[in-house]
Image: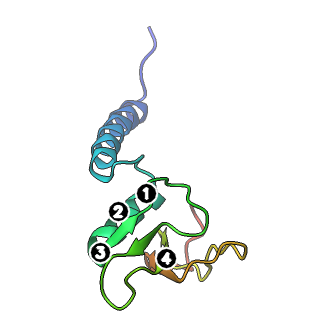
């Protein structure tokens, strides 16, 4: 008889919960629950954006529907941490970038 490590059992439970949450998030955003797709959905709701139907549109993710930037194409990026870099394609520049970041990484910890 093989005994299951309690950590492995708990990890399996958490993975199952994560999968269920990702399915629910995907249903809400209408795309896979990746960080990019979720960031685009948040930005669209907060900034009144019309997202492109194809998630892989070259250079931009959508357009502003209202306000001073109405009609401007925007590239949306969401980073878990403030790393000081921006993913830019010089061959397909949008009118604007909308960048959301998490906190600056803790310099005392190099564990990822």
**Could you say where residue 49 lies in the image, as x and y percent from the top left?**
35, 72
Q: Are marks 2 and 1 in contact (CB under 8 Å)?
A: yes
Whether residue 12 is situated above or below residue 33 in the rendered picture: above
Look at the numbered disc 1 and give the secondary structure of its residue: helix
Query: What residue is shown with label 2?
Result: 41
Mark pair 2, 4: CA separation: 15 Å
Q: Position of residue 3 (x, y in %)?
A: 42, 18
| Between discs 3 and 2, the one toward the N terminus | 2
- Residue 73: numbered disc: 4
Per the image, label 2 sits on a secondary structure element best described as: helix
Answer with mark 2 or mark 4, whichever residue precedes in sequence. 2
105 or 101: which is nearer to us? 101
User: How far is the residue under mark 1 from the one under mark 3?
Assistant: 16 Å
Looking at the figure, which quarter contains the N terminus? top left
Vertical placement of residue 36 versus 74, above or below? above
Labels 1 and 3: the sequence-earlier one: 1
The residue shown at (35%, 44%) is 22
Q: Which residue is mark 1?
A: 37
Nearest to N terminus: mark 4 or mark 3: 3
Mark 1: give few (<14), some (14-19) or many (20+) Cα within 10 Å. Answer: many
The residue under the point 54% across, 83% down is: 95
Residue located beneath label 3 in the image:
48
Q: Residue furthest front?
A: 71
* Helix, strand or loop at mark 4: strand
């Amino acid at each position: 008889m093989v005994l299951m490590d309690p950590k492995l059992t708990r990890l399996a439970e958490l993975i199952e919960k994560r999968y269920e949450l990702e399915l629910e998030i995907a249903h809400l955003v209408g795309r896979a629950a990746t960080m990019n797709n979720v960031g685009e959905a948040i930005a669209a709701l907060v900034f009144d954006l019309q997202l492109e139907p194809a998630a892989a549109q070259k250079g931009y993710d959508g357009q502003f529907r209202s306000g001073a930037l109405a009609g401007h194409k925007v590239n949306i990026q969401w980073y878990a941490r403030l790393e000081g870099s921006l993913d830019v394609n010089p061959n397909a520049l949008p009118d604007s970038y909308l960048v959301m970041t998490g906190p600056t990484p803790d310099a005392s910890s190099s564990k990822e």
